[in-house]
């Protein structure tokens, strides 16, 4: 069974984008290709910080995170080559739509004083990156079991050619953008 957001995309969003942007082919219509969630962990923290980040990211996404290692040593940051500095998960297809639905409907409204996400976080090629200050906005995380607050980056990669098309896609999919 396909997710609720995917059926919304195929039934209403895609046709609305075709009407607005006058696409000739259905394959030109922008779509969400993948969502990458990244948690960076300071190298100076204890080893348990990485384990906690991996566990919490796994709870949020439902997938096992991949560990990120440093590529070279930097003495000023007390960083050694090969040291674990974070973790990330790449979501595609049905899992991606489920996560996007949970992010928009459940997690983002739980942010204190939330007025919408910024319109300026596009990269010029239709990809959107959202910084989240703490992992406690997700309902999967139990408040009494976390040891430290951990931020994360959520990158939504689209097939849009520019920022305006990606903004229309994400807005019609339900992303709550802040008013100008």
Image (spheres, grey):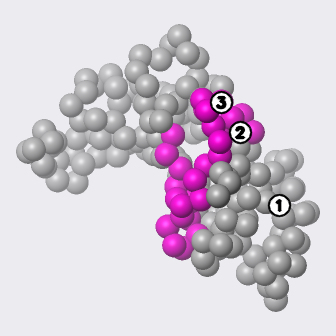
Name the one closer to the observer, 130 or 86. Answer: 130
Measured as percent of width and height from the top left, residue 90 is found at: 54, 51
Whether residue 90 is visible, yes or no, is no
User: Quadrant location of the C terminus?
Assistant: bottom right
In the rendered image, residue 63 lying in the magenta stretch gets the answer no
Q: Badge 1, how many Cα within 10 Å: few under 14, some, many 20+?
A: some
From this view, report whether residue 21 is shown above or below residue 79.
below
Measured as percent of width and height from the top left, residue 130 is found at: 53, 50
Q: Residue furthest front?
A: 180
For disc 2, the marked residue is 102
- For numbered disc 2, what is the local secondary structure? helix
Whether residue 169 is visible, yes or no, is yes
Mark identifier at residue 110: 3
Q: Residue furthest top?
A: 144
Measured as percent of width and height from the top left, residue 56 is found at: 50, 28
- For numbered disc 1, what is the local secondary structure? helix
For disc 1, the marked residue is 9
On the rendered structure, is 1 left or right of 65? Answer: right
In the image, the segment drawn in magenta is 105-132
């Amino acid at each position: 069974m396909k997710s609720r957001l995917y059926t919304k995309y195929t039934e209403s969003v895609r046709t609305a984008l075709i009407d607005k942007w006058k696409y000739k082919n259905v394959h030109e219509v922008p779509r969400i290709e993948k969502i990458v969630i990244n948690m960076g962990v300071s190298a100076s923290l204890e080893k348990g910080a990485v384990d906690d980040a991996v566990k919490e990211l796994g709870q949020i996404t439902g997938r096992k995170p991949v560990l990120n290692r440093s590529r070279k040593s930097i003495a000023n940051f007390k960083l050694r080559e090969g040291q674990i500095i974070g973790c990330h998960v790449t979501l595609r297809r049905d899992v991606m739509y489920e996560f996007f639905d949970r992010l928009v409907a459940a997690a983002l409204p739980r942010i204190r004083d939330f007025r919408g996400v910024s319109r300026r976080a596009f990269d010029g090629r239709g990809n959107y990156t959202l910084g989240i200050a703490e992992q406690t906005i997700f309902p999967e995380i139990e408040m009494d079991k976390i040891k430290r607050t951990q931020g994360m980056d959520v990158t939504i990669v689209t097939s849009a050619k520019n920022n305006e098309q990606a903004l229309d896609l994400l807005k019609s999919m339900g992303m709550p953008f802040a008013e100008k």
